[in-house]
Amino acid sequence: MSDTPGTAGPFVPERIAEWAYWIIEREAMRKRKAANKDPTRTVFSPDPILAGTRWCNVRRMDDKVSIWLMKNWYPDPAIAHEMPAPQLMAAALMARMINRTETLAHITGGNPFSGWKYERVLKRMYEVKESGTPVFTNAYIINGASGGPKIEQVLKAIDKCVRTRPFHYLDSSSMQKTAKHLHALPGIGGFMAGQVVADLRWVFRPDDDDCWLDRMVWAPPGPGSSRGMKYLLGLSSPNDMAGRGSDLTERQFLQFLPTLIFIARKHPEVGKVFRALGLEAHDIQNTLCELGKYIRVKNGGHAKNSYPPKASRS
């Protein structure tokens, strides 16, 4: 593992070293896989835990679904600001609340998102359900506050955003403010709102210095990243990575996130990854969730998804 920088602040140095190791080796795995010319090769790390488990990438936008969305679903960022706010918000909400590329492709016939039409989307989603294939992924939990079948819950939340002051929900000066507005919609939890905003940051005026001013200090803490942060702070044990214990509040989480970003920037090896990928607060938050998973498996626990998927193993 790489050396810890001069100060770990409020964090446990040995645990910062584990976090740094995950970041460095996970990014090395991504590069090895990208350079791989052998379609039968499935091992990309000498670490058996990293090699045998499915992980998010260090940079969120390098994940498979994010790449697909940017290439096939969202409008080109150069013209996205010309899309009416209701349609842009609908595109981002659909992308992450559904989060299954096959379903999204069926809804649009394989074309990029071009407009919100509730009845058409409802019909297409039930076609997917009736075919016996999954409609949603299990990556994100959908808040069931509005009740009823999941498809209707999701689409009604999106429809409400489209029809009721969509410009109110999109505040491009702040990721946190936009997420807070979205969280007020029924069926959209705080973490889901953060995932939607994380997409909007790269779709709507991504290179405008006057937009998304809090991108280096704010990210939505989920249960996994909260556990990872507590582990680094020495507030929990490896056994707590299975989900036991209380989570940090958003205020508590954000209190420590800037310090962790500073450590990432100054770390002799993580800093190279940080600069090369242009990491932001949301990416660092994401590494905490994956760190928790790594520690859990390392200490005898289990990961939800193996790599390669069990069905494809010989």
Image: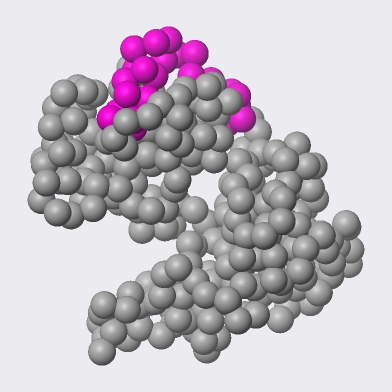
Q: Residue at x 38, y 29 (%)?
A: 147
Q: Is residue 67 visible?
A: no
Indicate yes or no whether the magenta region holds residue 100.
Answer: no
Q: Is residue 173 magenta?
A: yes
Residue 152: image x %, image y %? 28, 30
Quadrant in the rendering for residue 117: top left
Q: Nearer the viewer, residue 77 or 288?
A: 288
Give the image location of residue 118, x and y in percent.
21, 23
- Residue at image position (39%, 76%) is 307
- Give the tally of numbered discs: 0
Quadrant (top left/top right/bottom left/bottom right) for the C terminus:
bottom left
Q: Residue at x 15, y 39 (%)?
A: 126
What's the residue at 45%, 81% (across, down)?
52
Q: Which stretch is magenta? A: 152-178
In the image, is 290 to the left or to the right of 8? Answer: left
Residue nearer the viewer, 94 or 299 = 299
- Image x and y of residue 258, in percent: 76, 46
Q: Please tell me whether the stretch drawn in magenta is mainly helix, strand or loop.
A: helix
